[in-house]
């Protein structure tokens, strides 16, 4: 069912009015939030990584596991 069918036929409009209005408002809301964010996705990913990573010294097993992950044999 597409939006043109819903808006063209009054019976569909009465049945799906809430869905159409809610979808339009949600789309506008997401556009506005995307415009206001102005943060590069890569910078956001780096910031989230820095904020959420565990701050502890690396153990020998951590270094070994990381080396195995990066350089598989």
Image (spheres, grey):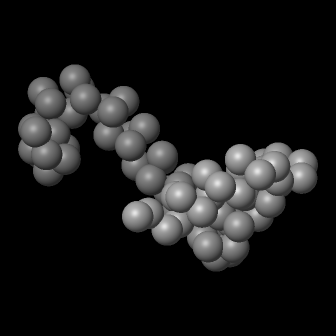
Furthest residue toward right: 56
Picture quadrant where residue 16 is located: top left
- Identify the residue shown where x is 38% and y is 43%: 23
Q: Nearer the viewer, residue 37 or 55?
A: 55
Question: Visible in this render: residue 30?
Answer: yes
Question: Visible in this render: residue 48?
Answer: no
Q: Nearer the viewer, residue 42 or 49?
A: 49
Q: Nearer the viewer, residue 42 or 69?
A: 69
Residue 25: image location, x then y, percent: 48, 47
Question: Which corner quadrant holds the N terminus?
Answer: top left
Horizontal arrangement in the rendering, residue 12 relative to residue 18 (left or right): left
The image shows residue 60, relative to residue 72, as above or below, that is above
Q: Nearer the viewer, residue 31 or 60?
A: 60
- Identify the residue shown where x is 15% and y is 30%: 12
- Identify the residue shown where x is 53% and y is 58%: 68
Question: Which corner quadrant holds the C terminus?
Answer: bottom left
The image shows residue 50, relative to residue 53, as above or below, that is below
Residue 5: image location, x then y, percent: 10, 44
Furthest residue toward top: 15
The image shows residue 20, relative to residue 48, as above or below, that is above
Residue 10: image location, x then y, percent: 14, 33
- Identify the residue shown where x is 71% and y is 47%: 61
Total numbered badges shown on the rendered structure: 0
């Amino acid at each position: 069912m597409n939006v043109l069918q819903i808006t063209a036929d009054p019976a569909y409009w009465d049945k799906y009015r809430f869905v159409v209005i809610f979808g339009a408002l949600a789309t506008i809301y997401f556009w506005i939030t995307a415009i206001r964010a102005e943060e590069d996705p890569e910078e956001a990913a780096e910031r989230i990584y820095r904020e959420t990573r565990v701050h502890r010294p690396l153990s020998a097993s951590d270094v070994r596991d990381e080396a195995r992950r990066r350089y598989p044999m």
